[in-house]
Image (cartoon, grey):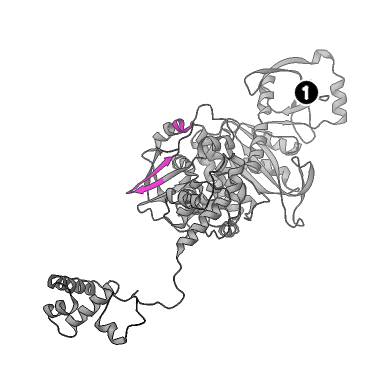
Amino acid sequence: MLKIDPNDSCVTYFTKPSEVLHKQYIALKHYFVDGYSAEQVAETSGYAINTVYSMVRDFRKKIKSQDDDPFFKTNTAGRRPIDHKEDIKETVINLRKKYLSVPDIQVVLDAMGTGLTIFSIEKIITEAGFARLPRRDKQFKDEAMTSPIPKLIAPKTEKILLNADAFSSQLAGLLCILPYIVKYKIDEAIKQSTYPETSDVGKYASILSFVALKLSNIKRYSTDDTWCMDRGMGLFAGHNVLPKAAWFSAYSSGITRDMNVSFLKSLQTIWKNNGLLSDTANLDFTTIPYWGDDEPFEKNWSGKRGKALASIQAALAQDPESGILCYGDTTIRHDNQDNVILEFLDFYHNDPKINNRLKYLIFDSKFTTFANLNEINKKGIKFITIRRRGKKLIEKINSFNASFWKKVEVEKAGGGTRTLTVCDDRDSLPGYDSPIRQIYIMENSRDKPAILITNEFNLKLQDLIRKYSRRWLVETDIAEHIDFFHLNRNSSGIVIKVDFDLTMTILAHNLYRLFCMDFAGYSNCLAQTVFDKFISAPGSVEIVGNIITVKLKKKRTLPTLMQQLKQFKDYTYPWLKNYKISFLVDSTT
C-alpha cells in the first residue's frame, strides 16, 4: 500500500512520486500512454536507460501471463480475509491446556492442513510459558485425547487422493492390521457384502471406519473426540480422516439383520477355508444393557451387575482352539432363546461345499431344552453341558457309596493338573429318547457337585471335563467385548444398532486373533495386551509414487513386529488404489 504525505498537493502525487511502485507506475504510463521514448522516461524519472527497458519488458510479460495486477490490489466483496496464524496459535495453546503432547498436537494440526512443523509447535508452547509435560500414564493420555477441546473443527471426510503427502499419526500401528485383512481376503468379503454404500463413502470405507474405531481402544465416542482428527486412522479406511459421529449413527440405521448374517456367513467360509475352526464350538449368552426407554425390551439377568435389567440378550459362538468368534445374534427374546442352538447349527452348515468339522457343542444349562438336546443328538452332534441340581438329583448323589467315586487328574490351563473326585453314571432325561451320560464332579471348594451331561460315551472322563472347562474362554471373550471393544457403551455419543455393533465387534476381535497368531508368546493374549504391545504406536506416514511408507516410533516390541511384517511387503490394498505399504522403524523415539 502506497504511503501518502498529507502535506502534498494532488499535483505532487502525479509529478513527484516517492514510493518505488508509484515511480514505476508513472514511468510506464509515460512510455505506453503519453508516448515518451525510453530516453525521455529515463530523464524524467531518474532511471537508467537499461532499467527502463527492463521495466517495459517485465511489464509486458506480466500482462500476457494474466497474473495478478502488478500495481493495484482488487478489493473483494464481503468480509476482510482472516489471518489464521492467530487462530492456529490459539488452537495449539488450547490443545496444550488439555495436556496434549507436542506429537499429539501435531496429529491434530496435520488433519487441519496447517503444515505446522513440530519445531514451530514447540516454539509456540514455549513462548506461551508452558513447561515440559510430566510423564503421563496411559489412563491420563486416554483422558486427554478424549476430553472436549474448544474451537476444534475436524475436516470434512473425503476419499484420500494418495498424492505425494506426509503426516503424523498417534495410531500409526493400527495400519499393521491392514495386511491381515488382505491375507485372509476379508476385503473381498466386505466388497461382496450387502452393506450399503454411497458415492462419498464406499463399502470398504464404511466397514473399515467402524473396524478402525473398534480396534483403537477408544473408550468414549463424541463429536469432540480427537479420533476424527487422526489421519492415520482415516488412511486405514481409505479416507483423509474418519467420518464424524453423526455419520456412524446414520449408517447404522440402514443395516438389517439379514445383512449381518450374510456377512458372518462370508467370514465363516474364510475361517473354515483357513483351518481356523476345530471340531468344537462354545456357546453362551451375554446381556447388553439398554439405557433408553425400556418398554420394548425384556428384562434379562446381568451377572456383572447382579440384577435383572432392561436389556438385549445376545448369543455368541467361539472356537476354543483358535479363539475365533464365528457367530453372533442379538435378536433373541425369551420365547425363542431355547432354539438359538438349532439356528446356530443351520448357520454353521450353510455351505455344503465346505467340509463341516463341527462335532461338539458346549454350553451351559440354561442355553436350551432337553427336547432340543434330542434334536441335536439326531443330527449326529455331540454336546456337553451342565444339568441343574434338583432336590431329587442331590438325594441320589448323596446315596452313592464311596466305591462309586474315583480320583482323576485333569489338566489345567497353565499346564499343571488338579485332582477331582468324579462319578460316571447313566441316566435318562424327559423329552430325550436315548440314555445320557451323567458325570458328577466334586471339588474341595464346593459343597454340591457339578453335573455334566453328554451324549459322548467314548471320551475319557478327564478329556470331557477339560473340554467343558474351556467353555469359560467364551465368557472371557464376552467380558473383553464389553471392556476393550466398548460393546454398547452407555457413555458413547454414537447410537449404533446393537446387532451391527456386535458384528463389527466380532470382526475386530477376530482380526486381533489373526494378528497375534503370528507372534510366539502372544497367541493367547487378550486384545488389550496386543493393543498395548504392538498397535498403540505413533509414527509418520509418507506417500511417494505408489508406496505408502509407515515409520513406527521405537518401542520394545517393534523388532518382533517388523520381522513379521516383512512377509507382507508385496501386498497391495484395493481400497488404497492398490498401493503397497512399507513398514519401517522411525529414526526418532
On the image, the x and y values in percent for residue 562 come to 42, 34
Write the start and end of the magenta stretch as one range.
541-561
Q: Is residue 562 above or below residue 85?
A: above
Residue sitting nearer the eye, 369 or 220: 220
Task: List the residue tagged with mark 1.
Answer: 440
On the image, the x and y values in percent for residue 244 come to 55, 57
Residue sitting nearer the eye, 463 or 123: 123
Task: Residue at 75% x, 48% y: name it.
Answer: 335
Specify the farthest residue to the top: 403
Specify the farthest residue to the front: 7
What secondary structure is found at the residue carrying circle 1? strand
Q: Is residue 179 above or below residue 442?
A: below
Task: Residue at 47% x, 47% y: name it.
Answer: 169
Task: Residue at 55% x, 37% y: name it.
Answer: 532
On the image, the x and y values in percent for residue 408 come to 71, 16
The reply, left or right, for residue 40 in relation to residue 182 is left
Q: Quadrant of the C terminus?
A: top left
Instruction: Tell me the kind of residue under disc 1.
Output: Tyr
Q: Is residue 450 above or below residue 367?
A: above
Q: Is residue 112 above or below residue 64?
A: above
On the image, the x and y values in percent for residue 38 come to 13, 78
